[in-house]
Image: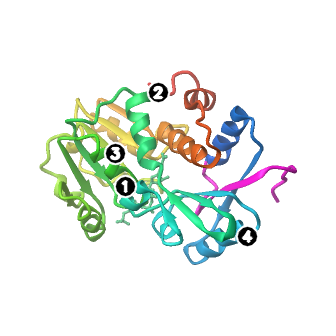
Amino acid sequence: MVQRGEGEARYGIVGHPVDHSRSPTIHRLFARQAGVEISYELIDAPPESLETAIRGFAAAGGKGLNITVPHKEAALDLCDTVGEAAKLAGAANTLSLREGGTIRGDNTDGIGLIRDLQENRGLTVAGARILVLGAGGAARGIIGPLLAENPAELRLANRSRERADTLAAKWDSVVACTFAELADEAPFDLVFNATSAGLKGEAPPFPTNVVGSNSTAYDLVYSLKDTPFVTWAKAAGSRRAVQGWGMLVEQAAESFEIWHGNRPNTRAILTQLLGPRWNR
Ligand code: NDP
């Protein structure tokens, strides 16, 4: 049972599972910074209950929802109006619940990643050879914004070839393949893990040749210890292997700005969550 104070506006995140999400902590810290009162709830809904969960939250006065695994694509179908990034991605991670029951969908994953790469980590996407592993909701959100930065190449690899082909077909320049088809590739400059591979304890199924001594491996997944992908990338010889905490906080900041019109100080929050060396 969530305790709410009077005057608090209700926000939340819908996923399945969702109990791992750090979004409640991050949004509460943003709200404290901005001096606004909110509640932010975890809502676990399997795919068959997604629409009921969203519409029920709106009917009960909820103002906004973040959407996470595995609902980002399905959530877009429930939106009455859609922002450019969500339209391009075919997936929404931020819903604004409006008077009269209408829903606006946005996608802040891509801009959150780009901000983390460029502003927090000083990484350059322009001219880089990029590999995106995964073709789910997160991959959908980041490919368009990565391409907008003019990389030399963007390769998309996924376990299911069909899903990779469908996603790659949205852009002329993106080539899709399976993980096995990467076996003869030279190391990429930037390798993004946008899969859930390894989270059940198995070794990530990617060929080790895709990273090398000049590669940066970026795991969209985040944890307080090394993630399976970070462990894999370090063992495979990657120069640098980092987790998606910065993306998480930056995409949340974009959502917060959409809802409250106020841009949080993300570096202060990252330092508060992870300590002063969070972007090493
Ligand atoms: P989806 O459920 O939409 O997609 C999952 C992806 O992982 C698919 O490409 C799927 O492949 C692949 N996959 C799942 N299990 C395996 C496996 N055992 N081996 C190989 N591939 C596998 O999830 P999302 O795209 O929404 O999220 C992916 C990850 O990114 C999540 O862990 C999420 O927490 C993280 N994320 C982090 C963000 C951040 O801000 N840091 C933002 C968004 C997501 P297939 O198509 O073959 O099923």
User: Of the residues under marks 4 and 2, which one precedes in the sequence?
Assistant: 4
Residues at circles 4 and 1 in contact by the CB criterion of under 8 Å: no
- Answer few, some or many: residues within 10 Å of disc 1's Cα (few below 14, many 20 plus, some between 14 and 19): many
Q: How far separated are the C-alphas under marks 4 and 2? A: 40 Å
- Indicate yes or no whether the magenta region holds residue 214: no
In the rendered view, would you say 161 is above or below 240? below
Pointer 1 with pointer 3, Cβ within 8 A: no
Q: Assign the N terminus to one quadrant of the image.
A: bottom right
Residue type, label 3: Phe
Q: Position of residue 256 (x, y in %)?
A: 60, 45
Separation of marks 3 and 4 at Cα, in angstroms: 38 Å
Mark 4 lies on residue: 59
Give the residue type that dot 4 points to.
Ala
Disc 3: CA contacts within 10 A as few (<14), some (14-19) or many (>=20): many
Q: Is residue 266 above or below residue 78?
A: above
> Is disc 4 placed on a helix, strand or loop?
helix
Q: CA distance from mark 1 to mark 3?
A: 9 Å
Determine whether the residue tagged by mark 3 lies in a helix, strand or loop.
Answer: strand
Q: Which mark is residue 139?
A: 1
Q: Residue at x 37, y 40 (%)?
A: 218
Residue beneath label 3, please?
192
Is 190 drawn above or below residue 72 in the view shown? above
In the rendering, which numbered label is found on residue 279? 2
Label 1 beta carbon less than 8 Å to ligand 1: yes
Nearest-to-viewer mark from 4 and 2: 4
Q: Which residue is farthest top?
A: 276
Residue 70 seen by the camera: no
* C-alpha span from label 4 to label 1: 31 Å
